[in-house]
Image (spheres, rainbow, N blue to C red):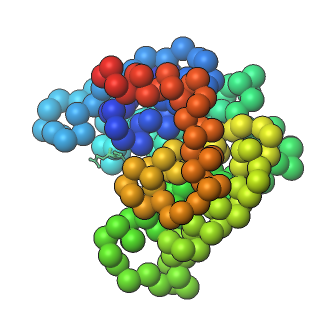
Amino acid sequence: MKLFWRPQTRSQRALWLLEEAGVDYDRVLIDIHDASKPRDPDFVKASPMGKVPALVDGAAMLADSAAICMYVADKHPEAGLAPAINDPARAQYYWWMIFTPGVIEPAMSEKYSGVEPNKFRNSWGDFATMFSTFENGLGDKQWILGDQFSAADIMLGSSACFLKQFGMLPDSKILEAYGERCMARPAYKRSMEINAAA
Ligand SMILES: N[C@@H](CCC(=O)N[C@@H](CS)C(=O)NCC(=O)O)C(=O)O
């Protein structure tokens, strides 16, 4: 597998997932700030929008951190990062995997840009609803699906960290503690070391 990535971006999620899965992969740095530089043709094919992360795995190729996390977690069931397809927990897994790109990120972007929310029109509701749904969904559980860490925690845990980094995390003991649990994982730490060394 070849991961196209850039430090300090959403690539962090794919790195973290690959480190959790413990699989072999190569990393290829992409300069997202200068699209005029020639780019690896595999990256161009895998990421039609020119965004990182992207992944190429033989004939399979895809972009988007959530899609990559789902792909690798399903391809490597032995890593235990996704409930089995016929496990009822799979339903909540889907919901929470989509919650970051479908709800958290647009709500963050709307708030950050100072756009007037319209929670009935917009599919992400609004920032306050996103936040209470996230917090209530986690409740007193260790991970979003309960005791079992999954790829959904990579999406949500990284989002909790991004919210904090952008100074957008409202007072929340639940999400603060969740972010800290995520950051304490050895695979998360390895992914941050890879980021720092690039
Ligand atoms: N939904 C995508 C978003 C990816 C994305 O926006 N990546 C940014 C970096 S965080 C990027 O590559 N920007 C460069 C560009 O748009 O040209 C994901 O989660 O992977």
Residue at point 16%, 39% (across, down):
34
Q: Where is residue 172 in the image (x, y as percent from the top left)?
A: 58, 60
For the C terminus, the image quarter is top left
Report the front residue among 193 and 125.
193
> 125 above or below 44?
below
Farthest-out residue, left = 36
Report the front residue among 29 and 142.
142
Q: Where is residue 139 in the image (x, y as percent from the top left)?
A: 74, 58
Residue at point 65%, 55% (across, down):
174
Q: Is residue 51 left or right of residue 171?
A: left
Q: Is residue 101 left or right of residue 146?
A: left
Task: Tell me which corner region of the image, top left, top right, bottom left or bottom right, holds residue 123.
Answer: bottom right
Q: Position of residue 121 (x, y in %)?
A: 51, 84
Q: Is residue 112 left or right of residue 187?
A: left
Farthest-out residue, top = 24
Residue at point 51%, 26% (across, down):
189
Task: Tell me which corner region of the image, top left, top right, bottom left or bottom right, holds residue 150.
Answer: top right
Q: Is residue 67 left or right of residue 146?
A: left
> 169 above or below 143?
below
Report the front residue among 77 and 60.
77
Inspect this view and state whether residue 108 appears.
yes
Inspect this view and state whether residue 93 appears.
no
Residue at point 86%, 44% (across, down):
87
> 116 above or below 98?
below
